[in-house]
Amino acid sequence: MSDQEILLFFFGLNSLLIIGDASLGYFVLPLLLRPEADTPVGEAAGVGGMRRLLTGVVTLSMLVNCYAFFQQYATLLYTVTALAVLDIMGQLVVRLRRLRQD
């Protein structure tokens, strides 16, 4: 595989990871903001504001992903991949811990 094909693969992978990360974050975020396990998910304070912040983070991640791909910065592209994977893993750990408490 050429360098261009590898970068294209990681660009596509990052796009899917970021979209998956945002989808997971949209549903895990209320669990993070609940003060106690018995508080209903919809009543968590600041969920709307944090979801707007999530939109900004996703936009910034996609911007960095596109910049790294079109400028051929492989290290930055790999860094975005690593951060997206770590974020997804962290969200899954938090979700599993919160579900065990319930």
Image: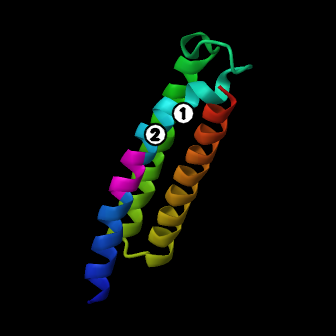
Q: Which mark is residue 59?
A: none
Q: Locate residue 80, reporting x and y percent.
A: 49, 62
Distance between the alpha carbons at the discs numbered 1 and 2: 6 Å
Q: Secondary structure at mark 2?
A: helix
Magenta span includes 16? yes
Q: Amino acid at mark 1?
A: Val
Left or right of residue 61, residue 93 in this image: right
Q: Amino acid at mark 2?
A: Leu
Identify which residue is drawn at 32% across, 80% down: 6
* Residue 3 on image: x %, y %: 32, 86
Q: Are marks 1 and 2 in contact (CB under 8 Å)?
A: yes
In the rendered image, residue 21, in percent from the top left (x then y), is placed at 45, 46
Residue 53 in the image: above or below residue 97: above
Compared across the picture, whether 102 is left or right of 5 comes to: right
| Quadrant including the C terminus | top right
Q: Residue furthest right?
A: 35
| Residue range highlighted in magenta | 15-20
Q: Nearer the viewer, residue 88 or 46?
A: 88
Q: Is residue 55 above or below residue 69?
A: above
Residue under pointer 1? 28
Mark number, residue 24: 2
